[in-house]
Image (spheres, coloured by chain):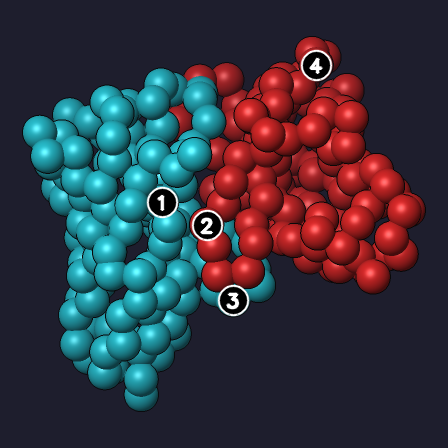
Chain colours: A red, B cyan
Amino acid sequence: GAVVSQHPSWVICKSGTSVKIECRSLDFQATTMFWYRQFPKQSLMLMATSNEGSKATYEQGVEKDKFLINHASLTLSTLTVTSAHPEDSSFYICSGLWGLNTEAFFGQGTRLTVV
Amino acid sequence: SQQGEEDPQALSIQEGENATMNCSYKTSINNLQWYRQNSGRGLVHLILIRSNEREKHSGRLRVTLDTSKKSSSLLITASRAADTASYFCATEIAAGNKLTFGGGTRVLVKP
């Protein structure tokens, strides 16, 4: 299957700082990128959907000014958690999709810990 | 909000036994997918079944889909310790659309 590389795999940051997570599709062009969040022992919850060159569509309850998503190219999407707080500590996972293909390819995830 | 619910939430079996988990969903779908997640890791795609399919096999995995009941099952036969993981179903309403995940089933296979 296609490869999506997510970086970093883990990060610890101080409360109030911003953290950027990158998601790259290595061998395909991801026209759509999805960003999910997963709290311990829970399922994945979709945060936002981004199409290349367009503004992201955020799910209800997700603050767009706090979770900045950029999808400027077909191979790179970034999620920036601004002014992070301990309650933002979670596992963040991206997935990339090409066109109307039915199988999305997931990154390895990023464990964010805000102290 | 979650589209699917999975049961059981947790399953503990001996190596060699079969593991069955179920997923129910609420709306019409284009396809349903099953994923495995090892602790603290990303997701591994296991199998995709389309809305016009009823059963699919992949190695030791067997997936069924009953659209009239809006439910799916995943069967892992002859389980191995390496199958220990969380398993999630995810539904896609339309091609190229977002996935909505179920709550997951945590499977422990004891050697």
The quarter of the rendered structure image containing the C terminus of chain A is bottom right
Instruction: Residue at the far bottom: name it.
Output: B111
State the CA–CA distance, disc 2 to disc 1: 7 Å
State the CA–CA distance, disc 2 to disc 4: 26 Å
Q: Which mark is residue A43?
A: 2
Residue density around tag 2, few if under 14, some if 14–19, many if 20 or more, within 10 Å = many
Q: Amino acid at mark 2?
A: Ser
> What residue do we see at 44% from left, 22% from top?
B97
Q: Which mark is residue B39?
A: 3
For disc 1, the marked residue is B102
Does the residue at mark 2 contact the one at mark 1 (Cβ under 8 Å)?
yes
Instruction: Residue at the far top: name it.
Output: A54
* Snapshot quadrant of residue A72: top right
* Snapshot quadrant of residue B29: top left
> Residue A26 or B31: which is nearer the viewer?
B31
Q: On the same chain: label 2 and label 1?
A: no
Q: SS of the residue at dot 3?
A: loop
Q: Is residue A19 left or right of residue A94?
A: right
